[in-house]
Amino acid sequence: MSDPMADFNSNIVTEFRANGGKVQGVFADAPMILVTHTGAKSGVERTTPLVYSRDGDRYVIIASMGGAPQHPQWFHNIKANPRVKVEVGTDSFVADAEVLTEGDERQRLFDQQAALMPNFADYQARTDRVIPVIVLTPAT
């Protein structure tokens, strides 16, 4: 039996790569990024499509999972293995992930993305957990 969310993500990844980073449907106007991460337990590489914002040369993603009470699986993978591959448009590069769960910078970056995409404020309001912010810095 297939996993509907995995199928949904797989279709977005395929469309993203076939169209130079552009997708249709619910994410048509959203800034999309693909993050390839290594499984914390399995060691298997997986690619997750996510929306992002920029902070200088850094990319910011948020582990909201739509305001669910738990973190998304990809977050646990990135926390365990912070070296990731990022695809934006037709560019790809290796990046190092830094997880922010508290502090002024986490709040500034969360608010910056919520200003662009108001759903993130709704997601935080739906859950008791502090939604982590992940900063992806291109590796040098």
Image: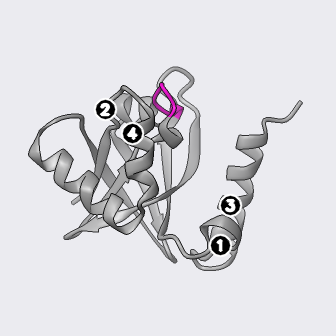
Marks 3 and 4, the one that precedes in the sequence = 3
Check the image and report above or below for 15 versus 49.
below
Regarding mark 1 in the picture, which secondary structure is present there?
loop
- Given residues 68 and 49, the one toward you in this image is 68
Task: Give the Cα distance between marks 4 and 2.
Answer: 10 Å
Which residue is the site of mark 3? 12
Q: Which residues are magenta?
A: 68-73
Q: Residue type at mark 3?
A: Ile
Regarding mark 4 in the picture, which secondary structure is present there?
helix
Labels 1 & 3 near each other (Cβ < 8 A) = yes
Q: Residue type at mark 4?
A: Ala
The tag on residue 110 is: none
Marks 2 and 1, the one that precedes in the sequence = 1
Marks 2 and 3, the one that precedes in the sequence = 3
Write the residue at 35% across / 37% down: 131
Task: Give the Cα distance between marks 4 and 1.
Answer: 28 Å
The tag on residue 130 is: 2
Task: Give the Cα distance between marks 2 and 1.
Answer: 29 Å
Task: Give the Cα distance between marks 3 and 4.
Answer: 27 Å
Which residue is the site of mark 4? 125
Give the image quarter of residue 46.
Answer: top right
Q: Residue type at mark 1?
A: Val
The image quadrant where one finds the C terminus is bottom left
110 relative position to 128: left or right? left
